Amino acid sequence: MTIFSRYILRQTSSSLLLVLLSLTGIVWISLALRELNVVTSQGQSALTLIKMTTLGIPSFVAVITPFALLITTIHTLNRLSSDSEIIVLTASGATAWTVTKPLVALALVIMAVVSLVNHFAAPWSYRLLREIVVQVRTDLLTQVIQPGRFSSPEKGLTFHIRERSLDGTLHGLVMHDARKAEETQSFLSEKGILVEDKGQAYLFMTDGHILRRNGGPTEPTQIIAFDKYAVDLDSFEKRAEEGMGTLKPRERYFDELVDPNPQLVEQAAPARKDEVQADPGAKAKRKASRRDDDEGQIRSELHERFSSALYPLAFVLMAVAMVGQAQSTRQSRNARMGLCFLAGVGVRLGGMAVNNVVKMDAAAVPVLYAIPLVAIGVSLVLIVRGARPSRGPQRLDRVVESVTDAFESVRQRFGRRRLAGAARGA
């Protein structure tokens, strides 16, 4: 690299590190506030809260790092333009690629980091987080629920026990589950015990009854007696990917997404006996529906990991195309910077929207890759055209001026309405 390339790389890298640390800190604080009930309601230590929130960061880093790179690239190019460094560089005979090369090199490094996080760091952290969550659920009844007191670990779920023996057995267990408005269940059991098996926690109850009501308060209540009954404590957590079995798509490594083990794809709860009697094919239909959903989630996760790694390069080229051209200090760059950032946000949001479509339709997979690739191609065309001398304003300048004029017209219109309203009120 030349001295100027190393200078640009050093300036952008230092700014990127600062912005990335700031955004990561904001994300960590938001995660900590969201999971604060782990300490306040579930009796866990602050160390458990720190572990859970820290393990959730890698997945967010893969999303915020490209945006951090976009922000720092825009800032660096704007500072170079403000100090007339790009103008001097262009006057000395250098091309637009002199500025582009170090930024593209940094983008390639970020692409490698994002790929590493997507394929290794994020699945690893999610698996560790799953173990901690299972342990929290296991501790839920042994530490939080006290004999003779009603405890609600989450809205609509209430526990009560008469006593707890030294071996951990729960006596006189009552569990009321009203989290679903269309179905309310109450479990009454003489004894209950917690069992952990293969990373999942279960509550086994003996000698009890289930009071189940489907619908409103006017519906009849079903009373079901049981000798033994097991409840999966995983159902205490509201999942976005309900129905997945041992491993969720985000917890799988690359080889597990490409060739998932059919035995691990779904271990859905069996259909209730009354459902099977009413419709013998209900269980088969439900399994087929969940199997399709699970395949769509696996397909979406796999392609999202590859397509998301293209956005750092797309964002860097977009910034160079819109902000990295040599401009006079009399020309305002604020509109260009704002348009560049909004374009980057729009491109990424478009990719996220298409990723949701991929879950339902595999035909949308090419569109998931086309969005960042088209952004890269259009940016390269704008960079090449911007490097050529032109008598009149560039096409991008005309677009920026049109957007600025439209925004100014809207602002003036609302300003006149506000003044007219104030005059009528006076």
Image (tube, rainbow, N blue to C red):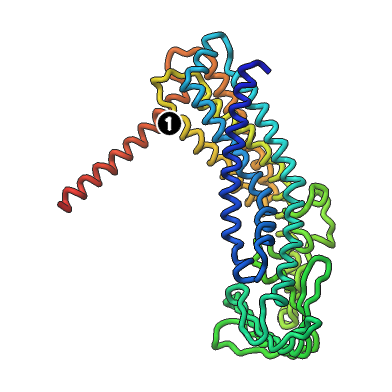
**Place of residue 190 in the rendered image (x, y in percent of width and height, measured from the top left):** 75, 90
**Place of residue 147 in the rendered image (x, y in percent of width and height, measured from the top left):** 67, 85
Q: Residue furthest top?
A: 92
The residue lying toward the viewer, choosing from 29 and 409, is 29
Q: Quadrant of residue 138?
A: bottom right
Quarter of the N terminus within the rendering: top right
The residue lying toward the viewer, choosing from 124 and 289, is 124
Residue 106, above or below 281: above
**Place of residue 62 in the rendered image (x, y in percent of width and height, measured from the top left):** 66, 44
Q: Is residue 321 left or right of residue 10?
A: left
Q: Residue at x 54, y 88 (%)?
A: 218
The residue lying toward the viewer, choosing from 279 and 271, is 271
Q: Residues within 10 Å of mark 1 (few under 14, many from 20)?
A: some
Q: Residue furthest left?
A: 426
- Residue underneath mark 1: 335
Q: Quadrant of residue 196?
A: bottom right
Q: Residue at x 76, y 62 (%)?
A: 131
Label 1 SS: helix
Tell me if I can see residue 338 in this picture.
yes
Q: Is residue 48 left or right of residue 154?
A: right
Tell me if I can see residue 183 in this picture.
no
Q: Amino acid at mark 1?
A: Ala
Q: Is residue 146 left or right of residue 181?
A: right
**Place of residue 369 in the rendered image (x, y in percent of width and height, measured from the top left):** 67, 39
Numbered circles on residues, count: 1
Q: Residue at x 54, y 41 (%)?
A: 345
Q: Quadrant of residue 248?
A: bottom right
Residue 286, above or below 54: below
Residue 315, above or below 122: above
